Image (cartoon, rainbow, N blue to C red):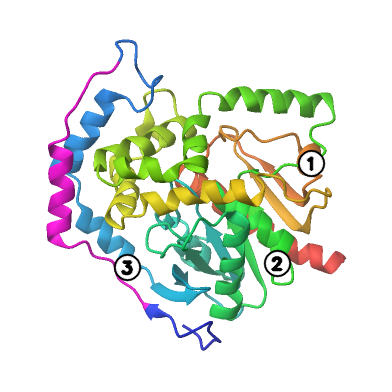
Amino acid sequence: MKDKTYASHSPAAYQFRIPEQQLDSILNRVEQFPWHEMPEDGGWNYGANLDYMKELCDYWVNKFDWRAQEARINSFNNFKLNISGIDMHYIIEEGSGPNPKPLMISHGWPGSVLEFFDLIEPLAHPEKFGGHVEDAFTVVAPSLPGFGFSGPPKRPYGPKKMAGVINSLMVEGLGYERYLAQGGDWGGAICSWLGYDHSQNCEAIHINVLTMRHPDGPQTQEELAWASQFDEDQIMQDGYRVQQATRPQTLSYAMMDSPVGVAAWIVEKFHDWSDVPTGELEKAHSKDNLLANIMVYIATKTFNTASWIYYGRREEGGRVLSPEGKRVEIPTGCAVFPKEMLRWPPKSYADKIYNITQWSEMPCGGHFAAMEEPEMLLNDIRKFARSLRVYAKEK
């Protein structure tokens, strides 16, 4: 790493390894899980499908190679640095060429930094993947506070407060006075707050989800139709969100004791939120990728603290960015994937919240864009970064 100014101390190199005894304990609990009934007409209508969960757990116990996944995690440049009292984990990959632009990429729930494993190298070293070195980024991928390899706050943080921690990581911790930010799911909300509260450092944001709302609400017929459809979409999706935003501690007692429970809670979301036909989850996500992400929550014992972000957002005031109707004024790129479960609004509505300089409507893809369609997302990030150079000249 280059010499930089750090927050409270120098970053410490980090490697993650599950002790053999802990790994055996996890697999034993999976193997001994007391399977139970599902309604005959179940499918995926009632939640995680019983037959699929049995199949996944059999693979987990008998075929899944955690040590191979662990080696891949540790093949990246992992560090920890104390920021605002939180031991923040991050992966950093210095970009190629003379002037790679710092790019912070942030995940959400129920994801992790593992979402970006197919993006980090191509973003940092495009010339190795058929691209041009002038498109290189220095990539910083943090684990959000309380998620995975990062330590938790003492009480719930929402995305606004997390944005402050991440800005401190980038600026005070790593010495990047100016940087770009990209995110989906909670990462999209965090990027929004970076663009709104920290525009002195965050030059531009690229998001593949729209989580924020304008206080005036929808106005046109198209916007009103979107809002109505959005509410209808969420009726069968809202249970987990309400639980985690109101009583996360009660949920934690079951989840922290059950690897299969954590897996089912997360697998349901990957099934419902990805651009796949019902019952065909593995058209987008392999068992290895699903289980690697699930194991991060289980092995780091962070299912509980990761859920706190929902409670934190409720305390921060929910989805409204500005009660006065102010918007993010730095350039904003939007990658609009058609099967995003948080249905995208018409651009006319998004324009009230962001200074949108790039709006890309994708042909396919869902909520987990970095995993489902990494090439599309990669190309759109690069395109956005190139447009910023033009935008700067025009200004």
Q: Are marks 3 and 2 in contact (CB under 8 Å)?
A: no
Q: Which residues are magenta?
A: 13-38
Q: Amino acid at mark 1?
A: Pro
Element assignment for label 3: helix
Residue hosting label 1: 215
Looking at the image, which residue is at 49% across and 58% down?
A: 155
**Earlier residue among tags 2 and 1:** 2
Foreground: 301 or 374?
Answer: 301
Q: Identify the image quadrant of residue 58.
A: top left
- Mark pair 3, 1: CA separation: 45 Å
**Earlier residue among tags 3 and 1:** 3
| Residue 310 is inside the magenta segment | no
Element assignment for label 2: loop
Q: Does the rendering let one see residue 19?
A: yes
Q: Are marks 2 and 1 in contact (CB under 8 Å)?
A: no
Q: Amino acid at mark 3?
A: Ser
Query: On the rendered image, what quadrant is the C terminus found in?
Result: bottom right
Q: Amino acid at mark 2?
A: His
* Residue 322 coordinates in the image, percent (x, y): 77, 51
Closer mark to the observer between disc 2 and disc 1:
1
Q: Identify the image quadrant of residue 59.
A: top left
Which label was assigned to residue 75? 3
| For residue 177, above or below residue 40 | below
* Residue 182 coordinates in the image, percent (x, y): 60, 57
Which label was assigned to residue 198? 2
Crowd class of label 3 (few under 14; some 14 to 19; many from 20; radius 10 Å): few
Closer mark to the observer between disc 3 and disc 1:
1
| For residue 243, above or below residue 304 | above
| For residue 174, above or below residue 306 | below
